[in-house]
Image (cartoon, rainbow, N blue to C red):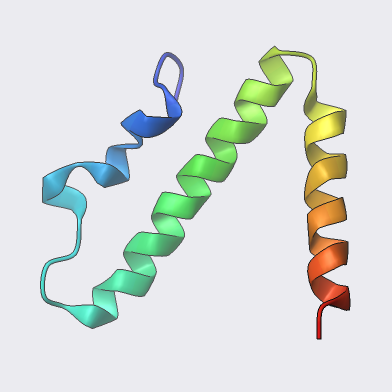
Amino acid sequence: MLGLKVHENPYLAAHRMPSGDTSALGDWLARHDAWKFGWEVEDASREGKILVHFKDLISIANRRALDP
């Protein structure tokens, strides 16, 4: 979302956080992470660093795949 900082993720608003329902936690976490991922991609794109951003993500994924 244009103009927001990463810490202003709308899913961090109190009314959007799951309360007491553990089944909703997974859904909330997925939405939070998806928003953050989109924010990071958009930010990298604006800074002209999109290629570096995705190379870093691939490198992290490859390292995790090699971990026992």
| Vertical arrangement, residue 5 with respect to residue 11, above or below | above
- Vertical comparison of 23 with 6: above or below: below
Task: Answer with the quarter of the image where residue 17 lies.
Answer: bottom left
Quarter the N terminus occupies: top left
Q: Is residue 25 left or right of residue 60?
A: left
Where residue 40 sits, quadrant-wise, is top right
- Image point 85% across, 53% down: which residue? 58
Q: Is residue 47 above or below residue 39?
A: above
Q: Residue at x 48, y 53 (%)?
A: 33
Q: Is residue 53 above or below residue 24?
A: above
18 displayed left or right of 28: left
Instruction: Tell me: 64 left or right of 27.
Output: right
Image quadrant containing the C terminus: bottom right
Q: Is residue 12 left or right of residue 43?
A: left
- Relative to the observer, which residue lies in front, 7 or 1? 7
**Residue located at (37% from left, 32% from top):** 7
In percent of width and height, residue 49 lies at 80, 22
> How many numbered marks does the figure carry?
0
> Seen from this angle, which residue lies furthest bottom?
68
Q: Looking at the picture, tell me which residue is in the foreground, 65 or 67.
A: 67
Which residue is painted at 80% across and 62% down in the image?
A: 61
Q: Quadrant of residue 65?
A: bottom right
The x, y position of residue 44, in whole percent, is 70, 24
Q: Position of residue 63 (x, y in %)?
A: 85, 65
Residue 39 in percent (x, y) is at 54, 32
